[in-house]
Amino acid sequence: MFIRAIPNALTLFNLVVGVAAALVALHGRLDEAALLVVLGMLLDGLDGRAARLLHAESEFGKQLDSLSDMVTFGVAPVVVMYQVQLRQLGLLGDLLAVLFPICGALRLARFNTQTKVRNYFVGLPITAAGGVLATMALMKPVLHPAQVILPAGMFILSLLMVSSVRYPNFKRVSYPKSVFVLVPVFAMTIFVLIRCHIVRTDWLAFGILGLYALYGVMRSIRYRLLTARRRSTPTDMATRSKD
């Protein structure tokens, strides 16, 4: 019985981390807050894997996970961004601060009501969106003009969550055996880079998560271009045959 409670315990720990991230951000410790959001992402991945491994999946756990995600990735990153930039924008900043969790809630509700098991996500997962938002806020010193880029990026992330853009679901992807060798090497490389202060942890997280968000958009654009090209090809051939 205790073992089957482990996934829900991890989910609750994720919730605690989200609340802690918001409180830490309110005290101005924004670096710590962003890293807590990233820690929440790791916990969010662990609770699902633990539930499947222990055969402890349940509707209760699913709903608890969504409620925790709403706090850790829908509210805490907004507090970080609000402290960094939104509070300086007046009403516009307040509207953006409300829009992001609304889109996150809609994204979670849509996911929870899906009946088909898919190998992809429809819309940017709130986990990734929250991670990008929290770490993007810390990029302010290198983004110019930050007062335009940060709000625009937040608005785009909000729309991506409720969009029809497809994102890969790594939980459903089959991996080659070489991954078990490459992942430890990759993890060790990142550890060395961070340990030697060659790259900052939050910036590295932003780069990885940002590429994931961008991948879905580029893939969607490529798919639409190919679809439009295929639709126009028969017409062009018919026109040429008439000539």
Image (cartoon, grey):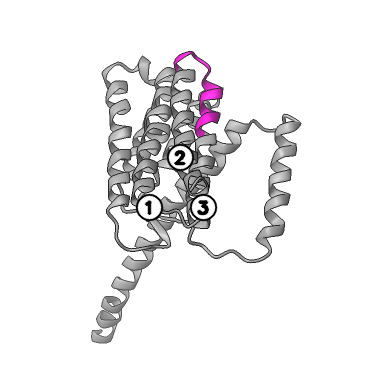
Q: Amino acid at mark 1?
A: Ser
Q: x, y (%) of residue 45?
A: 51, 46
Residue 228 left/right relative to 147: left
- Residue 103 vertical placement versus 79 (above, below): below
The residue that disc 1 covers is 58
Residue 183 left/right relative to 121: right
Q: Amino acid at mark 3?
A: Arg
- Residue 216 vertical placement versus 71 (above, below): below
Q: x, y (%) of residue 2?
A: 51, 45
Q: Looking at this view, name the residue that lies furthest to the top.
A: 27
* Pointers 3 and 1 in contact (C-beta within 8 Å): no
| Labels 1 and 2: the sequence-earlier one | 2
Q: x, y (%) of residue 31?
A: 55, 23
Residue in the image at 27% along x and 86% along y: 241
Dot 1 lies on which element?
loop
Numbered mark located on residue 11 in the image:
2
Q: Nearer the viewer, residue 119 or 239?
A: 119
| Labels 3 and 2: the sequence-earlier one | 2
The residue that disc 3 covers is 49
Q: Amino acid at mark 2?
A: Thr
* Pointers 3 and 2 in contact (C-beta within 8 Å): no
Numbered mark located on residue 112 in the image:
none
Crowding around mark 3 (Cα neighbors within 10 Å: few <14, some 14 to 19, many 20+) is some
Q: Nearer the viewer, residue 148 or 57?
A: 57
Q: Closer to the observer: label 3 or label 1?
A: 1
Dot 3 lies on which element?
helix
Crowding around mark 1 (Cα neighbors within 10 Å: few <14, some 14 to 19, many 20+) is few
> Is there any visible trace of residue 195 in the rendered image?
yes
